[in-house]
Amino acid sequence: MKKWVYSFGKGKAEGRGEWKDLLGGKGAGLAEMTRIGLPVPAGFTISTEACDYFYKHGKKYPPELRAQVSKALAALERATGRKLGDPKNPLLVSVRSGSARSMPGMMETILNLGLNDRSVEGLARNTGNERFAYDAYRRFVQMYSTVVTGLPKDQLEERLRAMKQRLKVKEDTEVGAEGWKQLLGEYKEYFRSKTGEVFPEAPLEQLWGATGAVFGSWMAEKAVTYRRVEKITGLLGTAVNVVQMVFGNTGDNSGTGVCFTRDPSSGEKTFYGDYLVNAQGEDVVAGIRTPMHLDEMAKRMPKVYAQLEKVREKLERHYRDMQDMEFTVEDGTLYMLQTRTGKRTPAAAFRMAVDMTNEKLISKELAIARIQPADVERLFYPVIRTDGERGVSQKPLAHGINAVPGAAVGQVVFTAQTAEEWAKRGDKVILVRRETSPEDVGGMFVAQGVLTATGGKTSHAAVVARGWGKCCIVGCEALDVDAAGRQMRVKDRVIREGEWITLDGSEGAIYAGQLPLGTPSLPPAYETLMKWADGIRRLGVRTNADTPHDARKAREMGAEG
């Protein structure tokens, strides 16, 4: 019988790290982290082959799949001592996508599945935290409504904003249990009014609804656009990862974060990442709240941070490459939720390749193979031309977080659609958003640069822009974006759609108008790696130059004639 489902937990896994084509990157990473003894919640992965079958057979599941999922779910319930939907001791799970190639934020995730009007009371009793239980429940209803049913996200967000205004609070963490109960009622009534049905209470109905939605997200417009832009072809589809929930939103001793084993912007061997206290994972990557740096976590949770440092070292040595990791801390206990090869800027790619070779992690041949032709091209992306030793002569309007270095000049636009329309007619644009979402990927790709008011260096905007070597500034708290009014306010300055701004992604500075751009100097690691390449190459390099300037530049770059 064909195997469609692969379980992992308690130090054992049916899958392996090299099975990305079968389990997707996330599923393979969870299996491998389990195998090497890292703290990973138990769960199971439905393979990419099941997704391939789903699309080839009119969106129907393989006949053996339901039985295999039931068996894996029963094993998960035994491993955790909890039962999906149980009113006394409920098991809650996350349902997440996972492609063989990293597609950050392009497919769907549903958290806290298994909650209903009965199990939420059991969760509240077991944790002694009613506020947390109903916060988890409203998050689930919100995600399920938008991801599975397709209800507009902004309508649910608007109800959340209105509720906080009534309660006179700014942050979600300030809302109590009664506030979440009230919002749940509003969400469910909105669900019924739009679908004609009550919100599903049966946990298995929830699970299969979420599974179908994750498979369906493989062909969503944003995912198809990303694969086209990244030239990703030949994959079977997405896997579905069903994993025991661990909670970062149980209080101030809990949190969630995203981190990189090295700085993905510079390549420096420093621990790099963001985390949020009393939050769930989607809060960080969505960029809805501006997170804190890991340095702050080291002060607040020193024991957990020390454990995370050990995980960092173990994973990088195991994979012999920079890793992008997701983690959750539940009441002081660390859990690893994902690891994958991290996206990096071209300058960082050169530095990491050279440093890892010098550290004996990789060979010179592998270091050279890791550099793509596009990495070399992107090294020449522009920087702001400075006024001698005085630097930039103009004062910046504001500063944000320097997520991706480089510089960009363009006309301000406030939607991805506008960015695509203006770019088609040859205009250079800067996409400005309060926070980006995966739906913005088309506009981000055509923009010269990206600017957001919220989010950190590991938010969706930063990760996607970094993979493209595109200038990006996030978390500019002085920025008030009015997308509906097609304008933004920076302190007392109003900038309307179509006006020009300049971004300095290296410094995180935003300037009014068009500043002159120049060519950056090459990083030291470039010369080192090119010398290594000269030592093993068999091809000669010559140039076709039309002017003395072109010939001189070609010689500087290593052309032999």
Image (spheres, grey):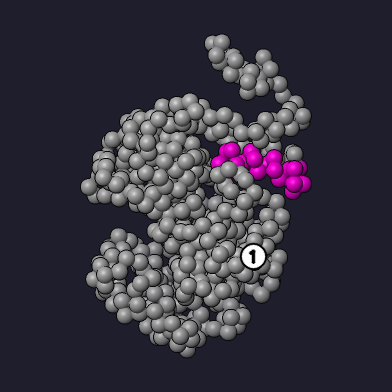
Q: Nearer the viewer, residue 515 or 153?
A: 515
Type of the residue with mark 1 = Ala
Q: Position of residue 200 (x, y in %)?
A: 37, 76
* Above or below for 460 versus 307: above
Reading the image, the residue beneath label 1 is 306
Q: Residues within 10 Å of mark 1 (few under 14, many from 20)?
A: few
Does 457 sit left or right of 76 as displayed? left
Image quarter of residue 70: bottom right
Residue at 71% across, 65% down: 36
Residue 131 vertical position relative to residue 142 in the rendered view, above or below:
below
Tell me the chief SS of the magenta region. Answer: helix
Q: Which residues are magenta?
A: 344-363
- Of the pair 497 and 420, the residue shown nearer to us: 497
Magenta stretch holds residue 231: no
Residue 508: quarter of image: top left
Is residue 383 visible in the rendered image? The answer is yes
- Relative vertical location of residue 342 with respect to residue 376 in this rendering, above or below: below
